[in-house]
Image (tube, rainbow, N blue to C red):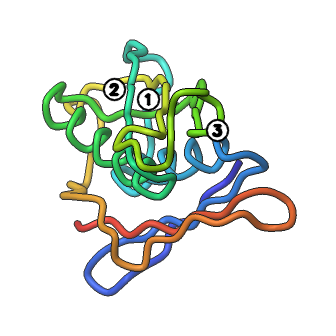
Amino acid sequence: MEYELREHTADIAVAASGDSLEAVFGAAADGFAAASCESVPTETGERFSVSVTAESREALLFDYLDELVYLRDVRGELPVDHRIETIDEPADRPNASDDDPAAWSLEATARGVPLTEVAAREIKAVTYSEMRLERVDDGWEAYVVFDV
């Protein structure tokens, strides 16, 4: 999985790719962390869990990244070293349907680095502006713009 930061007018964008849906979500989240600071201490911070549900695959990516912004603010920690444990699609659950508002779900973990230990740029929010998530020949690609 990989990501690349891209300038975007007054904002910053992350172009991410991965060989699976879990990998591209993790790369987008790592891009969020990289957009937030120059370097991350490797020795500090405890892992914590993140659970998100949404009505579509794209909404799941948006809601996951939005949850990371929220957790950063509430916990006073920058989420880094993202691990996507599972992404459940509606077809993975026999009683779910695409009409179910929580048809998609994600379970992940991240390491929370105290904001006092990083020189962080404030990412205000994830946006739907130009957002895309699509399957490509060798996996998945995502493009997400963050409001700074």
Q: How many marks?
A: 3
**Residue 38 shows in this picture:** no
148 and 95: which is toward the camera: 95
Q: Quadrant of residue 49?
A: top left
Q: Residue furthest top?
A: 46
Q: Quadrant of residue 86?
A: top right
* Left or right of 143 in this view: 94: right
Q: Quadrant of residue 79?
A: top left
Q: Report the residue marked by disc 3.
A: 91
Q: Foreground mark, 2 or 3?
A: 3
58 and 69: which is toward the camera: 58
**Residue 24 shows in this picture:** yes
Residue at point 32%, 39% (across, down) = 68
Image disc number at residue 109: none
Q: Position of residue 126 (x, y in %)?
A: 30, 60
Q: Report the residue marked by disc 1.
A: 41
Q: Position of residue 102 (x, y in %)?
A: 38, 38
Residue at point 86%, 60% (across, down) = 138
Pointer 1 or 3: first along the chain: 1
Amino acid carrying label 1: it is: Pro
Quadrant for the C terminus in the image: bottom left
Q: Residue furthest right?
A: 138
**Answer yes or no: do the residues labelled 2 and 1 have beta carbons within 8 Å?**
yes
Residue at point 36%, 50% (across, down) = 37
Badge 3 element: helix
Image disc number at residue 113: 2
Pointer 2 or 3: first along the chain: 3
Q: Foreground mark, 1 or 3?
A: 3
